[in-house]
Image: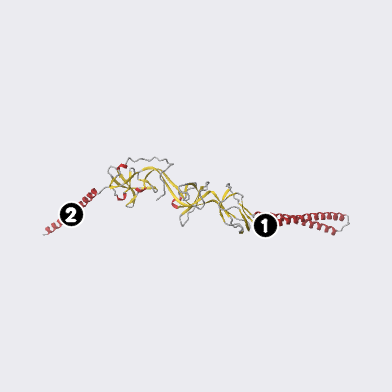
């Protein structure tokens, strides 16, 4: 009885084990049949090339004048004349504005009169000192002859010393009045405001006008601003990931919507040694030549800077890159078997058109359209009429044909 039970149990286990094997073989067979029956997917492909690829970033900024300053009077007064207006060219030393000078002219005349009085006083003191000197010499002679007393001699000496002191005071007053006259003349000259600056450029432009003729101006009140428009400064901000690739003298291509399709050349002239904590970016100044004065201060610009350039790089189209199982890769084309194989890759420079492949070394063709419908080993339909053997592009290193910014 026990043997029969054991036999029955063994038969049941054998039957279950056999059923599982049957199910597994059946599923594999169905899966193989499904794979064999899976239709090929039509795709677009592109060759893998060897060429030069550049990493170019674009940053936005604003143009500011290379040099700008405000003209203001050093004295107060009514503005009688303003000789320039916005946009006018100004020569170095040119008269810009004239203030009411009558009060200051009167001060000059008064200072001249005071000087003349002081000079006359000097002549009087000089005559007095000569007289007292003769009296002193006569007193000394009379004293030697015992005709004059000691007190008379002392009186003559005292009179001479007083006259001598008054003469010195008069001389000092002349110098004082001369300085007062110079001060009055300087203030009178301040009623004429002229354009004065340092540098070789002898012509500048009026950027702003702040007053009108007839206005009462206080000392240091702004009249106009003068700008040097021959050279402008583009102020842009570089993110921390690009900061290490920037250096003084690096060329920059400037474009603006004010002149579509036109490019202006510039060079990085200053780099801030610190990054702003709020934006994690650094201020960069770009010097832009503007001899034809097409660019204007305050214009919004875009600055393109080449951060890196790799020659002879393995390059695939940007559209061929996709992610599978959290791995970035491409589908390589097997031309003989008409299948696509997924290959994980390590990328380098990436722009809007192309991607540099660092690892592994690949060649041939990659799928650029339809790859999202593929699995590793999927059959594909190729546009045969477009195919030829992949060519290696021999691009000169100085004339790259791939540019753009990182993704």
The residue lying furthest to the left in this view is: 1
From the image, tell me which residue sits under label 1.
Answer: 102
| Residue 176 coordinates in the image, percent (x, y) | 71, 56
Dot 2: what SS? helix
- Which of the 4 quarters of the picture holds residue 169? bottom right
From the image, tell me which residue sits under label 2.
Answer: 19
Q: Residues within 10 Å of mark 1 (few under 14, many from 20)?
A: few
| Residue 122 coordinates in the image, percent (x, y) | 77, 55
Distance between mark 1 and mark 2 Cα atoms: 122 Å
Residue placed most toward the observer, 130 or 37: 37
From the image, state whether disc 1 or disc 2 is nearer to you.
1
x 66%, y 55%: residue: 188
Quadrant into which the N terminus falls: bottom left
| Residue 163 coordinates in the image, percent (x, y) | 79, 57
Residue placed most toward the observer, 160 or 73: 73
Q: Is residue 142 left or right of residue 31?
A: right
Label 1–label 2 contact, CB within 8 A: no
Q: Residues within 10 Å of mark 2 (few under 14, many from 20)?
A: few
| Residue 38 coordinates in the image, percent (x, y) | 25, 49
Up/down of 7 relative to 403, above or below: below
Q: Is residue 321 left or right of residue 275?
A: left
């Amino acid at each position: 009885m026990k043997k029969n039970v054991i036999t029955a149990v063994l038969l049941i286990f054998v039957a279950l084990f056999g059923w599982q094997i049957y199910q597994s073989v059946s599923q594999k067979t169905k899966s193989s049949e499904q794979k064999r029956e899976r239709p090929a997917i039509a795709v677009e492909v592109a060759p893998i090339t060897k060429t030069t690829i550049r990493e170019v970033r674009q940053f936005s900024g604003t143009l500011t004048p290379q040099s700008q300053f405000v003209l203001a009077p050093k004295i107060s007064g009514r503005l009688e004349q303003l000789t320039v207006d916005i946009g006018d060219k100004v020569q170095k030393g040119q008269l810009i504005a004239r203030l009411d000078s009558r009060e200051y002219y009167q001060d000059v005349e008064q200072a001249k009169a005071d000087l003349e009085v002081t000079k006359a006083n000097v002549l009087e003191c000089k005559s007095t000192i000569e007289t007292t000197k003769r009296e002193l010499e006569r007193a000394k002679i009379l004293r030697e002859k015992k005709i004059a007393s000691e007190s008379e001699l002392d009186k003559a000496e005292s009179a001479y010393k007083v006259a001598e002191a008054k003469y010195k005071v008069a001389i000092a007053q002349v110098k004082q009045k001369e300085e007062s006259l110079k001060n009055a003349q300087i203030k009178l000259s301040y009623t004429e405001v002229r354009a004065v600056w340092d540098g070789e450029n002898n012509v500048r432009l009026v950027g702003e006008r702040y007053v009108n003729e007839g206005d009462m101006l206080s000392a240091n009140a702004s009249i106009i601003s003068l700008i040097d428009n021959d050279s402008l400064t583009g102020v842009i901000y570089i993110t921390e990931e690009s900061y290490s690739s920037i250096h003084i003298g690096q060329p920059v291509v400037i474009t603006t919507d004010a002149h579509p399709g036109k490019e202006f050349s510039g060079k990085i002239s200053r780099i801030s040694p610190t990054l702003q904590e709020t934006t994690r970016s650094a201020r960069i100044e770009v010097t832009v030549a503007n001899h034809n004065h097409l660019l204007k201060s305050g214009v919004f610009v875009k600055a393109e800077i080449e951060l890196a350039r790799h020659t002879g790089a393995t390059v695939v189209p940007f559209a061929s890159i996709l992610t599978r199982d959290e791995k970035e890769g491409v589908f390589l084309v097997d031309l003989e078997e008409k299948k696509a194989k997924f290959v994980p890759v390590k990328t380098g420079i990436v722009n809007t058109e192309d991607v540099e492949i660092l690892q592994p070394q690949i060649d041939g063709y990659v799928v650029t359209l339809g790859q999202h419908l593929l699995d590793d080993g999927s059959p594909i339909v190729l546009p045969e009429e477009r195919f030829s053997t992949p060519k290696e592009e021999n691009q000169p290193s100085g004339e790259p044909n791939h540019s753009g910014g990182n993704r």
